[in-house]
Image (cartoon, grey):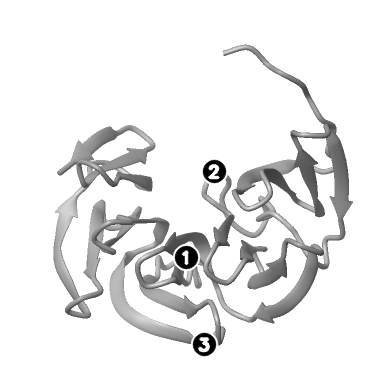
């Protein structure tokens, strides 16, 4: 792969999100965002009141920080202090959800946004987390399942709708079946599992960790 172009973002870049409806690429930084249009090469800056990455002093880097909901035409941005719901047509703030989130994932089957909460540690004790779901139309937030310890990355199988969560503190994957509304048996995931991604065709889940990379089917 050869670089096509480079763009300057005046903040520490934390994540990228593609907006398929327009082909634009959203760059999330610690103190604002930028939108790159590959068709024109233009770059537009966005206020931190609308778009922001997850500052390193709030949480950890390397996790998906924003997802695009094509059904509702909205971007859900994990700012580190909650989730901003943004209209990418105007790059304006629709609403702010005062929740504790770590990573976000979109399920095209249920048209919901999932995230793990909380991600903070209290008095040095790793927290047990919960899987939360946001309705993209009403913005209602629902606690759908208990998770493991210090949950991090969330990923969704777009075909089955199953949700997987990497639990760094309990060294496993939580598996949520939305059809039954219940958790399936957890999957051991090696040392410090951090993030996950799903191959929808094979239904394999790949997990990354500090000292571990593997796939589960």
Instruction: Give the residue number, with chain letter if any, for mark 2.
Output: 62
* 205 relative to 102 in the view: left or right: left
- Quick one: label 2 or label 3, which is nearer the N terminus? 2
* 90 relative to 181 in the view: left or right: right
Which quadrant of the figure has residue 41? Answer: top right
* Residue 79, horizontal then vertical, whole percent: 67, 63
Instruction: Give the residue number, with chain letter if any, for mark 1.
Output: 124
Pointer 2: residues within 10 angstroms few (<14), some, or many (20+)?
Answer: few
1 or 2: mark nearer the eye: 2
Pointer 3: residues within 10 angstroms few (<14), some, or many (20+)?
Answer: few
Instruction: Residue at 42%, 85% (x, y): give it.
Output: 142
Query: What secondary structure is marked by label 1?
Result: loop
Instruction: Give the residue number, with chain letter if any, for mark 3.
Output: 140
Q: CA distance from mark 1 to mark 2?
A: 22 Å
In the rendered image, the residue lying farthest to the left is 185
1 or 3: mark nearer the eye: 3
Q: Nearer the viewer, residue 87 or 28?
A: 87
In the rendered image, the residue lying farthest to the top is 2
């Amino acid at each position: 792969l050869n670089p096509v172009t480079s763009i300057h973002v005046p903040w520490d870049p934390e994540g990228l999100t593609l907006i398929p409806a327009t082909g634009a690429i959203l760059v999330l930084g610690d103190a604002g965002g930028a939108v790159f249009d590959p068709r024109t090469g233009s770059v537009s800056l966005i206020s931190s009141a609308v778009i922001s990455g997850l500052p390193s002093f709030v949480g950890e880097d390397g996790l998906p920080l924003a997802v695009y909901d094509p059904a509702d035409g909205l971007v859900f941005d994990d700012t580190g202090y909650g989730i901003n719901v943004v209209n990418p047509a105007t790059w304006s703030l629709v609403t702010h959800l005062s929740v504790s989130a770590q990573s976000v994932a979109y399920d095209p089957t249920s048209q919901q946004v999932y995230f793990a909460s909380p991600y903070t540690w209290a008095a040095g004790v790793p927290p047990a987390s919960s899987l939360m779901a946001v309705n993209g139309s009403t913005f209602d937030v629902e606690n759908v399942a208990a998770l493991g310890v210090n949950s991090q990355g969330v990923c969704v199988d777009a075909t089955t709708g199953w949700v997987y969560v990497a639990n760094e503190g309990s060294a496993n994957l939580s598996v949520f079946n939305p059809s039954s509304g219940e958790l399936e048996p957890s999957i051991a995931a090696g040392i410090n599992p951090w993030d996950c991604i799903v191959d929808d065709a094979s239904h394999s889940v790949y997990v990354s960790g500090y000292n571990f990379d593997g796939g589960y089917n």
